[in-house]
Image (cartoon, helix red, strand yellow):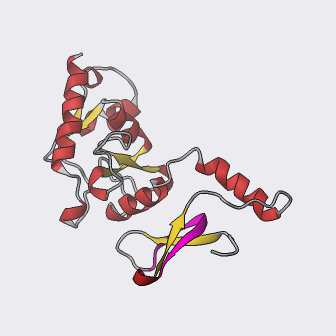
């Protein structure tokens, strides 16, 4: 803290005590001796213009500004809860999965909690965010009416239309990690509104 040197913070994710997400750089900005802890700051305070570390931090900062700070932790927790499977189609390819927010994180209730998340493949995430695919509070998949009647190839038929009326194929085993039914209700209301407009 006195030397203002950057540190790596290993943030625990999921229920496995051996899984961590490294967050770099972080800085200690204050000590709380009574609680036997330090205050950690994610703001970059490292300034040594010709240092190789400064170059690494600049590259890191460029990536960091393009993604929300909580997103890697949220993604790790959601994918762990869903055993790295898409909730809709059960695809098990982590590189093709996203941690989708039920209520977007730019809204007041859009917290980075597993209960506000769904593990979705890229197709189902985009369909969910664009109200093409809805999920009822009792975990049933609904597809927008016009999409159900649209003619197209196998991606449309097998990727969307065939999931109409099906229950989610993957949900977390732990009940407190399952999608919050009130949040699903709010998201489903948006889906229904999009259908009627």
Whether residue 53 sits left or right of residue 41 in the image: it is: right
Instruction: In the displayed orientation, state which residue is furthest to the right.
Output: 50
The residue shown at (58%, 44%) is 66
Total numbered badges shown on the rendered structure: 0
The residue shown at (61%, 64%) is 24
Instruction: In the displayed orientation, state which residue is furthest to the top.
Output: 197
Q: Nearer the viewer, residue 138 or 53?
A: 53
The reply to whether residue 84 is in sight is no
Dominant secondary structure of the residues highlighted in magenta in the image? strand
Q: Nearer the viewer, residue 110 or 72?
A: 110
Q: Position of residue 167 (x, y in %)?
A: 18, 47
Whether residue 120 sits left or right of residue 28 in the image: it is: left
In the image, residue 90 sits, relative to residue 128, either above or below, namely below
Residue stretch rendered in magenta on the structure: 18-32
Q: Is residue 21 magenta?
A: yes
The residue shown at (20%, 18%) is 196
Q: Nearer the viewer, residue 19 or 49?
A: 49
Q: Is residue 136 magenta?
A: no
Instruction: In the displayed orientation, state which residue is furthest to the left.
Output: 138
The reply to whether residue 14 is in sight is yes
The residue shown at (35%, 41%) is 104
Quarter containing the C terminus: top left
Q: Position of residue 48 (x, y in %)?
A: 80, 61
In the image, residue 127 sits, relative to residue 168, either above or below, namely above
Q: Nearer the viewer, residue 14 or 41?
A: 41
Whether residue 77 sits left or right of residue 109 in the image: it is: right
Q: Position of residue 97 (x, y in %)?
A: 44, 51
Quarter containing the N terminus: bottom right
């Amino acid at each position: 803290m006195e030397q203002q040197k950057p540190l790596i913070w290993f943030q625990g994710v999921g229920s496995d005590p051996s899984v961590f997400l490294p967050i770099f750089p972080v800085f200690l900005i204050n000590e709380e001796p009574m609680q036997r802890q330090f205050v950690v700051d994610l703001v970059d305070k490292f300034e040594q213009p010709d240092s190789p570390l400064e170059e690494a931090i600049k590259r890191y900062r460029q990536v960091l500004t393009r993604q929300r700070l909580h997103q890697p932790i949220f993604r790790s927790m959601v994918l762990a809860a869903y055993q790295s499977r898409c909730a809709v189609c059960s695809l098990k390819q982590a590189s093709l999965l996203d941690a989708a927010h039920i209520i977007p994180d730019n809204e007041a209730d859009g917290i980075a909690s597993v209960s506000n998340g769904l593990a979705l493949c890229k197709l189902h995430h985009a369909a969910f965010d664009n109200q093409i695919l809805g999920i009822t509070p009792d975990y049933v998949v609904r597809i927008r009416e016009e999409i159900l009647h649209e003619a197209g190839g196998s991606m449309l038929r097998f990727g969307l239309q065939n999931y109409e009326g099906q229950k989610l194929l993957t949900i977390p085993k732990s009940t407190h990690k399952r999608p919050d039914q009130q949040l699903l209700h709010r998201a489903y209301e948006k889906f229904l509104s999009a259908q009627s407009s």
